[in-house]
Amino acid sequence: MGSVQLGQVLDLADSDDIIGKTKALAVIESLPGVGKVKARRMMEQIGIAESRRLRGLGDQQRAALLAAVGG
């Protein structure tokens, strides 16, 4: 629905256990205009493993992800 931005979700991942344990791929796939194939390509280009959870993303990975999705 677009009610929460990706940056907000990444910020919440540090403090919220449920969000932090969510796979990054699932969150990226849920973004408007990003499907399964585009999400996997994006993660591969950034260097994020498909099994990586939001809490496990590094600062550079988070910044690259935000830049890739434009938010």
Image: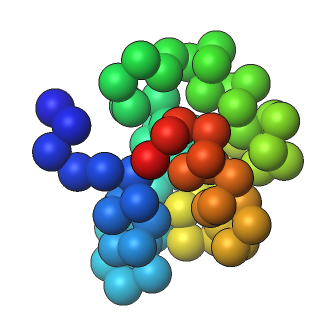
Q: Is residue 61 above or below residue 35?
A: below
Q: What is the x, y in percent for residue 37?
A: 64, 14
Q: Is residue 25 left or right of residue 30?
A: right
Q: What is the x, y in percent for residue 57?
A: 66, 66
Q: Is residue 62 left or right of residue 19?
A: right
Q: Quadrant of the N terminus?
A: top left
Q: What is the x, y in percent for residue 22?
A: 45, 56
Q: Residue furthest bottom?
A: 15
User: In the picture, residue 68 is in which quadrant?
Assistant: top right
Q: Residue at x 55, y 71 (%)?
A: 55
Q: Is residue 10 above or below residue 52?
A: below
Q: Residue at x 33, y 64 (%)?
A: 8
Q: Residue at x 38, y 31 (%)?
A: 30
Q: Is residue 50 above or below residue 53?
A: above
User: In the picture, residue 46 is in which quadrant?
Assistant: top right
Q: Residue at x 61, y 27 (%)?
A: 39
User: In the picture, residue 17 is in which quadrant?
Assistant: bottom left
Display coloring: rainbow
Mark count: 0
Q: Is residue 51 left or right of residue 22?
A: right
Q: What is the x, y in percent for residue 4?
A: 23, 51
> 1 or 52: which is nearer to us?
1
> 64 or 55: which is nearer to us?
64
